[in-house]
Image (cartoon, helix red, strand yellow):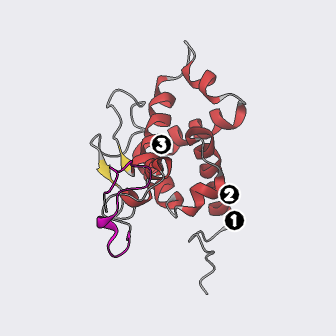
Amino acid sequence: MNGTDSSGVTSAREREDAERFIGLSVALTGFDAAELAETGMAEIYRSTVLREAGPLSYDRLVAALTDTASLPETLMSKDGDGELVELARAVCHLWYLGVWPGLPEHGLRKGNMTASHSPYVVSDRAYAEGLVWRCLGSDAPGTGAPGHGSWARPPAGVPTESGAR
């Protein structure tokens, strides 16, 4: 073994960072830690956020979510930090859609942002693992195997005409 656990995390520091990211993601998405971990995307998303926003902004977001009990009020207050609001939105977007939405050029402090402002899909699995599909109670289109002949039956919950086969 190379010392990695099932999530691909290798050191105590990396495990702590992964737990912090899951914790902030729980606060932002409304999903619990087990549901987020089940997607298998936490480490990919964490590294994306670190790369795109930079460690300073990432650490500020983690601190803001750790130091307060009520995230929405803290981030959305009149004197809230616009940079943190943008970053929190981007993290939510990433979890729900599997797409890094990009950050506005003016949204982060100079010298802290390291990468592109354009949206992109972060991995092949990101689309299929998006939380939006869990909210809808289905698989992402084109990713789940509904079973042979499923096309011949109406979707669950759809009323059919009497006598329809």
Image position of 40 (left or right of 128): right
Image position of 165 (left or right of 5): left
- Quadrant of the rendering where the C terminus is positioned: bottom left
Q: Calculate the distance from the C-alpha at mark 3 to the C-alpha at mark 1.
A: 24 Å
Count neighbours of disc 1 (C-alpha within 10 A) and say few if under 14, some if 14 to 19, many if 20 or more: few
Is label 2 in a helix, a strand or a loop?
A: helix
Q: Residue at x 35, y 57 (%)?
A: 154
Q: Does the magenta-highlighted stretch encompass residue 146?
A: yes
SS assignment for the magenta stretch, majority: loop
Q: Which residue is mark 1?
A: 12
Q: Nearer the viewer, residue 154 or 126?
A: 154
Q: Which residue is mark 2?
A: 16
Q: Residue at x 45, y 48 (%)?
A: 136
Q: Does the magenta-highlighted stretch encompass residue 155?
A: yes
Q: Which residue is mark 3?
A: 91
Q: Calculate the distance from the C-alpha at mark 2 to the C-alpha at mark 1.
A: 6 Å
Q: Calculate the distance from the C-alpha at mark 2 to the C-alpha at mark 3.
A: 18 Å
Q: Which residues are magenta?
A: 145-163
